[in-house]
Amino acid sequence: MVKSILKKKVSVKVEKTKTGFSAYAVDYPVFTTGKTMSDLSKNIVEALNLYFEDDEIEVAEKDIKLEIELKQFFQFYRVINAKFLADRIAMNPTLLSHYVQGRKKPSIVQTEKIMKGIREIGKELSELNLYS
């Protein structure tokens, strides 16, 4: 029997915990945990596939949209310096600091600008090779 594929991405909220990460699907009663983001991603795919098993729907990592609160992101990924990021994306460092600390909530446009900057930095880092 041929399995169906999802028509839209499953939105999954991620939260940092003392032991790793927890996640839940926004529109489905599916929850999981993982020590790393990689573990969490695999576990949410497995949990969603179990949930959709009777409907013969297959879920892959590409079908999932992981979302983490901005404040938690910066608490966990402390390696990303908010001032450096603000300079990179031409944002007022004080404003970004307010977002990071949860004092203000960024608009959708500001959130997209921040994510674009984070992704650009990540892409640059992933393309580097170190030597000694």
Image (cartoon, rainbow, N blue to C red):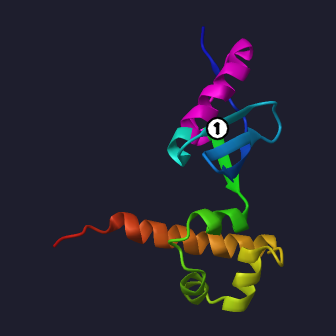
Please report the bounds of the magenta region as a residue range.
Answer: 40-62
Judging by the rendered image, the residue that carries numbered circle 1 is 33
Task: Please say whether residue 10 is visible from this viewpoint.
Answer: no
Majority secondary structure in the magenta region: helix
Query: Nearest the camera: 32 or 113?
Result: 32
Q: Residue at x 57, y 75 (%)?
A: 117
**Compared to 44, does 97 lie above or below?**
below
Question: Does residue 48 belong to the magenta stretch?
Answer: yes
Q: Amino acid at mark 1?
A: Thr
Query: Nearest the camera: 95 or 11?
Result: 95
Q: Residue at x 60, y 71 (%)?
A: 116
| Residue located farthest toward the left when viewing the structure as drawn | 132
> Local crowd at mark 1 within 10 Å, few (<14), some, or many (≥20)?
many
Residue 21 is situated, as x and y percent measured from the top left of the image, at 63, 46
Residue 99 is situated, as x and y percent measured from the top left of the image, at 75, 77
Q: Residue at x 48, y 73 (%)?
A: 121
In the shown orientation, is residue 21 left or right of residue 37? right
Question: Does residue 52 belong to the magenta stretch?
Answer: yes
